Image (cartoon, rainbow, N blue to C red):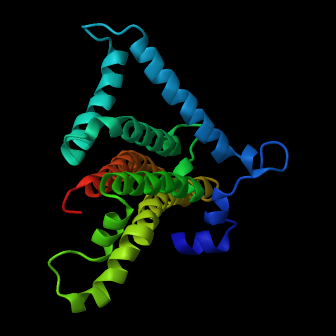
Amino acid sequence: MLTETLLSGEFEPPSAADFQFAPIFGDSILFSKPVFLVALSVILIASFFIISARKAAVVPSRLQFAGEGVYSFVRNSIGQDVIGPEFMRFVPFLFTLFTFVLCNNLFGIIPFLQFPSMSRIGFPIALAVFTYVVYHYVGIKHHGLKKYIKDICFMPGVPKWIYIILTPVEFATYFIVRPATLSLRLFANMFAGHLLLLVFTMGGEHLLASTILMKILSIFSFGFAIGLTFFEFGIECLQAYIFTLLTALYIAGALADEH
């Protein structure tokens, strides 16, 4: 009954078109909602940590405690635990990466904004490029270009005939697969999560404007939307953590002596 109603009515299910925004003003894509959300995230992140650290005290305020908690989490749980002794010089990058991805992800469940910036593929790709450049630069600087490439393509202790298969695979992994999967994982999770929220929210609105039975069923649709919002919050935090953790792992691998 529900399916027949949806198909026979004017309900239009959400699609990739709902992720496309016309410029707010002018004709340039640079003036669209996702770009403004990214700019807003920078302002919010900078303002939060400036304000939280402005009146730093031995006994921290709630705001200072929150800011220090986020920094300590990235510094200790990601930087120190993953990279090791040389972790401190990478903490600013990891901290910036984590807070930036997290803030833009959380926009997806914030009222009136309600769009995760990372559901637009261009932004995850840009972040993956930064990570790509950083860990390759670190590896080349630490080992030298020749040894770095040699250790990637010719893993020590492997029979020579295996290199015919292993060398192309390892080269593709380090230079193609890693940045591709890093960006696609973040994009796909944010895209799928937002799409699900749209399905149940728009479906509930459509049922609400229909018959009495459909109005009753709309309660379940809105209920699923609310439940998914909490679930999406967890996914958004998790994806920010995973993106930053993988970046730290790549940097640690580039620094490893056995690389």
Q: Quadrant of residue 176?
A: bottom left
Q: Quadrant of the C terminus?
A: bottom left
Q: Position of residue 71 (x, y in %)?
A: 32, 30
Position of 160 relative to 195 (above/below): below
Residue at position x 58%, y 75% from top?
Answer: 4
Q: Quadrant of residue 111?
A: top right
Residue 198 in view of the camera: yes
Residue at position x 60%, y 69% from top?
Answer: 6
Q: Position of residue 61 (x, y in %)?
A: 32, 11
Residue sticking out furthest to the bottom: 161
Residue sticking out furthest to the right: 26
Residue at position x 30%, y 88% from top?
Answer: 165
Position of 236 relative to 70 (above/below): below
248 displayed left or right of 116: left
Closest to the observer: 66 or 213?
66
Q: Position of residue 30 (x, y in %)?
A: 73, 47
